[in-house]
Image (spheres, rainbow, N blue to C red):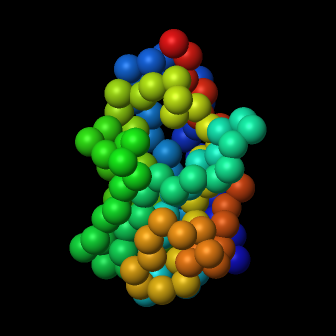
Amino acid sequence: VQLQASGGGVVQAGDSLRLSCSASKGTSRNSAMGWFRQAPGKEREFVASISFNSERTTYAESVKGRFAISRDNARMSLQMNSLKPEDTAVYYCAVGLRPYSGSDPGSYRYWGQGTLVTVSA
């Protein structure tokens, strides 16, 4: 099982960034996928999730209206607009245990390595 996240970088407040995550063949079939993030000194937190068929998306309140999650089979993206310094974190992609998975990290079975997003003021 392999999850590969990419797209992180250093941007200024107000800029946009697009993260991508590719899952190895068969890993994400019939499973939800999601993004989590972990800022320095803080616990990992939920960012967004998308159901196996892309019909249902869920967002953390802190990113609603700014971030958009999408997927095309085993490839998932996170479009991040109007970035803020508080969005600075390592972002992780994950594959859920079920077709629909929410914000609980325990409902995800596979995790990728993180990609660092740094937003300067």
- Where residue 10 appears, as percent x and y from the top left, is 59, 23
Query: Residue lying furthest right in this view?
Result: 41
Q: How many marks?
A: 0
**Residue at image coords 66%, 66%:** 111
User: At 28% across and 71% down in the image, what residue appears?
Assistant: 56
Q: Give the side of residue 61 with respect to residue 11, left or right.
A: left
Q: Position of residue 91 (x, y in %)?
A: 60, 47
**Residue in the foreground of this view, choosing between 39 and 56:** 39
Compared with residue 4, is residue 102 higher up or lower down, i.e. above or below?
below
For the point 55% across and 16% down, which residue is it? 120
Q: Residue 106 vs residue 46: left or right?
A: right
Q: Nearer the viewer, residue 38 or 113?
A: 38
Residue 54 placement, left or right of 39: left
User: Is residue 108 placed above or below 26 in the rendered structure?
Assistant: above
Let me know if residue 83 appears in the view. Answer: yes
Q: Residue furthest top?
A: 121
- Residue 49, quarter of the rendered image: bottom left
Q: Position of residue 103 (x, y in %)?
A: 48, 66
Q: Is residue 46 above or below residue 85?
A: below
Tell me which residue sits at (45%, 76%) in the image: 101
Which image quarter is the N terminus in? Answer: bottom right
Is residue 29 in sight in this rendering? no
